[in-house]
Amino acid sequence: MKTLVIKNLKKKFGTTWAVRNLNLELEPGEIFVLLGPNGAGKTTTLKLIAGLLHPDEGDVVINGIDTRKNPLEAKSRIGYIPDEPFIYSKLTGREFINFVAGIYNVKHDDYEKKMAELFKRFGVGAWIDGFSEGYSHGMKQKVVMCQLLLHDPQLILIDEPLVGLDPKSSKTVRETFIELKNQGKTLFICTHTLSFAKDIASKIGIINVGEMKFIGNLDELSKISGKRDIEEIYLKLSEESVNETIP
Ligand SMILES: Nc1ncnc2c1ncn2[C@@H]1O[C@H](COP(=O)(O)OP(=O)(O)O)[C@@H](O)[C@H]1O
Ligand SMILES: [Mg+2]
């Protein structure tokens, strides 16, 4: 069964299309990387899939579950990290993780071991028991990465996973994503880090002014653009187009 099916998805803010007629299908074990300039519609797309925004038109189906008809059921299959990870400032990182595990109905005994492994993997130190108001962006990113995996989501949505992470943590994130892919999970990642797309994506999408211009693997995009380097490919395929307003 396909993990994600998006049909004719549309979202407008005022008179501007943020996402226009998006169609996409992802299988288990795929890493889809969405690239595009600032304001292209990447975050809006992720929020529409995660159910944080309602589309003007179109459907999102996750593991066969229609997100309009069964929103809670669909959300239980998703792990989502927004571009600005939010942690209540007066909670410690550990309390935040326990809080989110509670929302997903994951029992403490069931995730304690997994949490310890994740802390080790991401180099989470004693700071996890300090208030999150003192955390750097990278520390928050590590907490939400650990939290993300506790309820074993089939579809993982991440907006800019590498922002604020040190090189070692970036490498860990990259390795974790590949491991998840090998477990048959589906990942949908928005990023500006082109090397990341080149290294781990099984499929790359390029969005501009709300429109998915190209979808394919690196070889296919290379052929279409006539370029070989990922930066050249991206620059060629994401060339400016005029933002059309709704009449
Ligand atoms: N809540 C909002 N209200 C009005 N316009 C928005 C809102 N969120 C996004 N937009 C607009 O939608 C477009 C796409 O934004 P976004 O999805 O955040 O792009 P990206 O993540 O690719 O940088 C932009 O033109 C942005 O200004
Ligand atoms: Mg964004």
Image (spheres, rainbow, N blue to C red):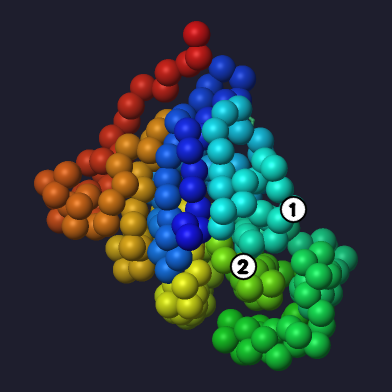
Q: Residue 72 carries which label?
A: 1
Tell me where residue 90 sits by quadrant: bottom right
CA separation, marks 2 and 1? 13 Å
Decide if residue 183 is on the left or right side of residue 36: right
Tell me where residue 214 sits by quadrant: top left
Q: Where is residue 188 in the image (x, y as percent from the top left)?
A: 48, 57
Q: Tag 1's secondary structure?
A: helix
Q: Position of residue 30 (x, y in %)?
A: 41, 64
Classed neighbour count for the residue bearing mark 1: other residues with Cα under 10 Å, few (<14), some (14–19), many (≥20) = few
Closer to the camera, 176 or 111?
A: 111
Name the residue tied to disc 2. 153
> Which quadrant of the frame does ligand 1 lie within?
top right
Residue at x 34%, y 57% (from the top left corner) = 203
Q: Position of residue 238 (x, y in %)?
A: 31, 39
Classed neighbour count for the residue bearing mark 2: other residues with Cα under 10 Å, few (<14), some (14–19), many (≥20) = some
Residue at x 27%, y 56% (from the top left corner) = 217
Could one spot residue 221 in this view of the protein?
Answer: yes
Determine contact: label 2, label 1, CB under 8 Å: no
Could one spot residue 96 in this view of the protein?
Answer: no
Query: 234 above or below 241?
Result: below
Q: Which amino acid does label 1 sit on?
A: Leu
Q: Which of marks 2 and 1 is nearer the N terminus?
A: 1
Decide if residue 87 is on the left or right side of residue 183: right
Residue at x 72%, y 69% (from the top left corner) = 135
Residue at x 42%, y 50% (from the top left corner) = 25
Number of labelled discs?
2
Q: Which residue lies furthest to the right in this view?
A: 90
Q: Which amino acid does label 2 sit on?
A: Pro
Closer to the camera, 241 or 75?
A: 75
Q: Tag 2's secondary structure?
A: loop
